[in-house]
Image (spheres, grey):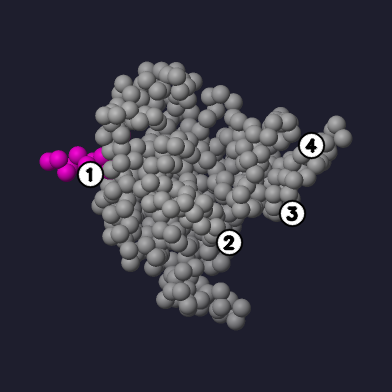
């Protein structure tokens, strides 16, 4: 038993594994990412250091002194007052109180608010309400204060939106019709992102976080890239974060391009380069956690993608470490042992500029 | 550091070096509470523990923007409302 260690699976289950099994998971995890994205595997020294981090006897681990990084978030303040569907504690607080508590009691590097649905489309009808809240909070908060939203192209398809549902057209073999519908939806989405951000910019918006980009595939990603380009032309001093929803851009359309590059199939290093080209200031890497593989397998994979991404672009790269992303187990309350091991590894080996 | 990443696209090491130089301290002290507590109060950058009468919120952000030589859009709006 002396050569076994407690670790977790991607669904959070606490398991005991032998050292050789942990080392093998790290090796196969990095090999999987390297092969998929065409990037280098983690070196043997990096794999050995990751083994040390995973098997550290302390429940909580930390980065070495001097390796601290900043953190951005996608609606963490909502976790104070929202309910289970947003991972929230249900505390009866206003948005302003939540932001100030997050900033002053939790010591947050940056703060953020967003619509309860956290999507662009529903913000439009209540943009003046959102602008008022944003303005009021920005006057009393000290840390960088973002407004955030997911592009969520899916809301533009029937029955929720105006466009014929591409997911219903494709099984019928109507591929061209599905593509046209996605292009139409992407046009609506680009317009809505620009509209919402410009309205918030009128009240002193300090930064916008486009989170979970490309969750509906390549057309979703295209809409975001076009919006960022337009916003940076019109508002060059507005900081923009673009975070993605997975390590691979799904080709739901398959043919859309941005600046001559096909978006479908892009891995994080290519995603970061094109996001930088569009004009964004920070890129957020997302790598999906496989629930039936170990934390170390998922983490080795995420770290491999992340390290290559930071080397491929000139803008800061933040690793997305919410539940089920970049090696964090996919569960309601991610365990602190996994969260801190993932954070330390992504920063010290993956060279993340932030989380 | 977050302000420098947002406004100047600085990677973390560059951001730390820039802010440390502006504050006149070593990078290692950026996370040293014993050093940063007094610097924050002296420069009016906002303190974690609330000091009555010292700048917080937009007034602290105005000082942060001036110290770092960056544009913070909420501060620009705030300043324009005094004209």
What residue is pinned by disc 2? A250
Q: Which residue is at a point 37% across and 18% down the rendered structure image? A: B24
Percent x, y for residue B19? 39, 26
Question: Sequence-wise, which precedes: disc 3 or disc 4?
Answer: 4
Label 4 belongs to which residue? Answer: A5
Marks 2 and 3, how far apart at CA: 22 Å
| Secondary structure at numbered mark 1 | helix
- Of circles 2 and 1, the one toward us is 1
Which residue is at 51% across, 36% downward? A353
Q: How many marks?
A: 4
Q: Nearer the viewer, residue A88 or A254?
A: A88
Q: Please tell me whether mark 2 sits on a helix, a strand or a loop.
A: loop
Residue range corresponding to the magenta coloring: B69-83
- A41 is higher (above) or lower (below) than A115: above
The image position of residue A203, as x and y in percent, is 26, 50
The chain letter for the residue carrying disc 1 is B
Q: Does residue B41 show up magenta in the picture?
A: no
Q: Chain of mark 2?
A: A
Judged from this view, the residue extending furthest toward the bottom is A172
Give the class, few, some or many, for how many residues have Cα within 10 Å of label 2's Cα (few <14, many ≥20).
Answer: many
Evaluate whether residue A149 shows in this view: yes
Q: Nearer the viewer, mark 4 or mark 1?
A: 4
Choose top left, top right, bottom left or bottom right for residue A57.
top right
Does dot 4 land on a helix, a strand or a loop?
A: strand
Query: Where does label 1 land, which residue?
Result: B77
Instruction: Please say whether residue A281 is visible from this viewpoint.
Output: no
Quadrant where the N terminus of chain A sits is: top right
**Alpha carbon separation for disc pair 3 and 4:** 18 Å
Label whose residue precedes the other's in the sequence (4 or 2): 4
Q: Position of residue A28 (x, y in %)?
A: 76, 44
């Amino acid at each position: 038993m002396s050569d076994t260690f407690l670790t977790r699976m991607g669904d959070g289950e606490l398991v005991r594994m032998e050292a050789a099994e942990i080392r093998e998971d790290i090796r196969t995890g990095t090999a999987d990412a390297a092969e998929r994205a065409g990037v280098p595997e983690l070196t043997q020294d990096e794999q050995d250091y990751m083994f040390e981090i995973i098997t550290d006897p302390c429940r909580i681990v930390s980065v070495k002194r001097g390796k601290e990084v900043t953190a951005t978030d996608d609606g963490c303040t909502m976790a104070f007052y929202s309910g289970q569907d947003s991972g929230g504690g249900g505390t009866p607080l206003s948005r302003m109180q939540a932001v100030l508590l997050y900033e002053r009691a939790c010591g947050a590097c940056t703060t953020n608010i967003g619509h309860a649905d956290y999507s662009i489309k529903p913000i439009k009808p209540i943009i003046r309400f959102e602008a008022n809240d944003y303005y009021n909070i920005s006057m009393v908060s000290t840390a960088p204060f973002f407004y955030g939203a997911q592009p969520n192209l899916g809301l533009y398809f029937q029955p929720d939106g105006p466009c014929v549902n591409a997911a219903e057209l494709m099984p019928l073999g109507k591929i061209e019709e599905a593509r046209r519908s996605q292009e139409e939806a992407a046009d609506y989405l680009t317009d809505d992102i620009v509209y919402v951000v410009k309205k918030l910019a009128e009240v002193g918006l300090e930064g916008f976080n486009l989170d979970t980009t490309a969750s509906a595939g390549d057309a979703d990603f295209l809409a975001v890239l076009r919006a960022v380009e337009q916003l940076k032309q019109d508002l060059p001093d507005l900081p923009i974060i673009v975070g993605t929803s997975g390590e691979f851009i799904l080709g739901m359309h398959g043919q859309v391009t941005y600046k001559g590059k096909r978006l479908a199939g892009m891995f994080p290093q290519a995603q970061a380069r094109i996001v930088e080209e569009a004009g964004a200031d920070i890129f957020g890497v997302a790598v999906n956690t496989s629930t039936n593989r170990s934390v170390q397998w998922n983490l080795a994979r995420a770290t491999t993608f992340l390290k290559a991404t930071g080397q491929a672009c000139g803008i800061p790269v933040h690793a997305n470490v919410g539940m089920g992303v970049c090696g964090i187990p996919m569960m309601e309350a991610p365990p602190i042992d996994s969260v801190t091991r993932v954070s330390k590894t992504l920063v010290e080996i993956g060279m993340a500029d932030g989380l | 550091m977050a302000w420098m990443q947002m406004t100047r696209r600085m990677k973390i090491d560059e951001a730390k070096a820039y802010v440390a130089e502006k504050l006149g301290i070593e990078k290692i002290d950026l996370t040293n509470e014993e050093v940063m507590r007094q610097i924050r109060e002296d420069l009016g950058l906002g303190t974690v523990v609330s000091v009555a009468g010292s700048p917080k919120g937009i007034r602290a952000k105005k000082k942060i923007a001036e110290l770092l030589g960056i544009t913070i859009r909420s501060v620009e709006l705030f300043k324009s409302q005094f004209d």
